[in-house]
Image: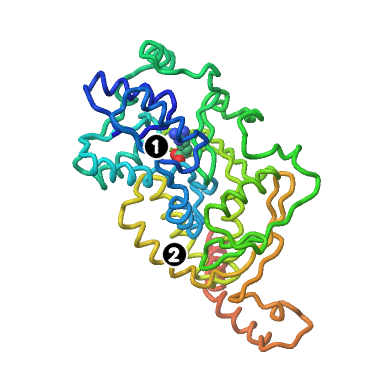
Amino acid sequence: MLAYSGGLDTSVMIKWLQEKYNAEVITATVNVGQPEDLAEVEEKANNLGVLKHYSIDAKEEFATDYIFPAIKANALYEGKYPISTTLSRPLIVAKMAEIAEKEGATALAHGCTGKGNDQVRFDISIGALAPDLKIIAPVREWNMTRDEEIEYAKVHGIPVSTASKKYSIDQSIWGRSIECGVLEDASKEPPEDAFEWTTAPEKAPNTPEYVTIEFEAGVPVALNNEALAPLSLIEKLNKTAGKHGVGRIDHIEDRMVGIKSREIYECPAATVVIDAHKDLEKMVMTRHEVLFKQQIDAQWTFLAYAGLWLDPLREDLEAFINKSQENVNGKVRVKLYKGGLHIVGRSSPMSLYDQNLVNYNIKTSFNQAYSEGFIQLWGLQTRMHNILKRKAKEQKTKSGA
Ligand code: ARG
């Protein structure tokens, strides 16, 4: 079984597995929002002499079972990256493992390199879901340079696209990862041609656009009062936010293998939805819930990033997260303008925000006289410490004199 994308690496892999392992190769392409045409990919696989090819459209499942939990967990790795590549890996492996079992495959091969995170996610998930399968990661074994691969492809009649690719792209409906080439110089601004989903902020429309996102139990259910299924909602918001240049990410990221990498992403919908979701949580949750949940969210995100989607801790954390979302209902109004994302309004039937409480001119049940006593107790230890500190200093100056 080979997880096949239709690109150069995995195409070369088909031939390489046939030659080196004398293997009969079955390929499968799991679509989570890649740009490649599934029918073309299938034709390409068949032309390379595979035994069988599977095309699986998993976009709906990806949205509902992987992206929605990530929204509830406000998943941003190292505070920035909506783990758009990450999330698809365990789903791809689950689909591959299913087919492998049905087909009686003996090994599962994937196109990950030995330097990235994806190998960690693939290998651990395969080990968890299909423990009897041998794992083959040809790129870790074959030691071919890009030029050698192209040469190998030519010799074996594998079509090589003439447009020499400037970047290495990975795409799902949750975002686009752009790597390699000039982007590797972390000191330089990414050139405009790296981006496809987002307009350059300076070229974005001159009038702002407002989007209202409605949440129910922590997940988005409607855009501008139109109820939408998870996948259509994400696709629609990607377009709208992308048009206004929202969702470009450029940061330094810690990979699992220790390498620091400069990563460029375009994640318009993810950026908007997570920001809106966080804002709504702060309106409906107690401060104790908000602060505690930040730690749970970070742990959930780290597990997913680190290839441990199938560790039971993820579901343990989700038991907390899901319970915490019961009251996360309401609407958030977002203003999109020239690359900027601004939350400009929010409302909820479960709001703990009370406009009367903050107003100085309205009489409410809030008794200001109580505040004085509260402050006495709240600052008790802080006052004691500073009094002791001053005494100790005075004594020191005395004895020193
Ligand atoms: N650094 C990101 C991650 O670990 C993106 C990786 C992109 N993967 C790729 N095969 N191009 O999730």
Label 1 sits on what residue type?
Thr
**Residue 8 horizontal side relative to residue 349, left or right:** left
The location of residue 10, given as percent across then percent down, is 38, 27
**Number of numbered callouts drawn:** 2
User: To which residue does mark 1 refer?
Assistant: 29
In the structure shown, which secondary structural element does the residue marked by tag 2 occupy?
helix
The location of residue 64, given as percent across then percent down, is 46, 56
Image quadrant holding the N terminus, namely: top left
Label 2 sits on what residue type?
Ile
Residue at the image point whose x is 69% and y is 38% from the top: 199
The location of residue 211, given as percent across then percent down, is 69, 57
The location of residue 194, given as percent across then percent down, is 61, 30
- Ligand 1 lies under 8 Å from the Cβ of mark 2: no
**Residue 175 horizontal side relative to residue 69, left or right:** right
Front-lying residue, 9 or 337: 9
Callout 1 environment at 10 Å: few (<14), some (14 to 19), or many (20+)? many
Q: Looking at the picture, does residue 8 appear above or below residue 93?
A: above
Mark yes or no: residue 261 visible. yes
* The disc label shown at residue 159, or none: none
User: To which residue does mark 2 refer?
Assistant: 321
**Residue 227 horizontal side relative to residue 70, left or right:** right
Quadrant housing residue 344: bottom right
Mark yes or no: residue 391 visible. no
Residue at the image point whose x is 26% and y is 22% from the top: 18
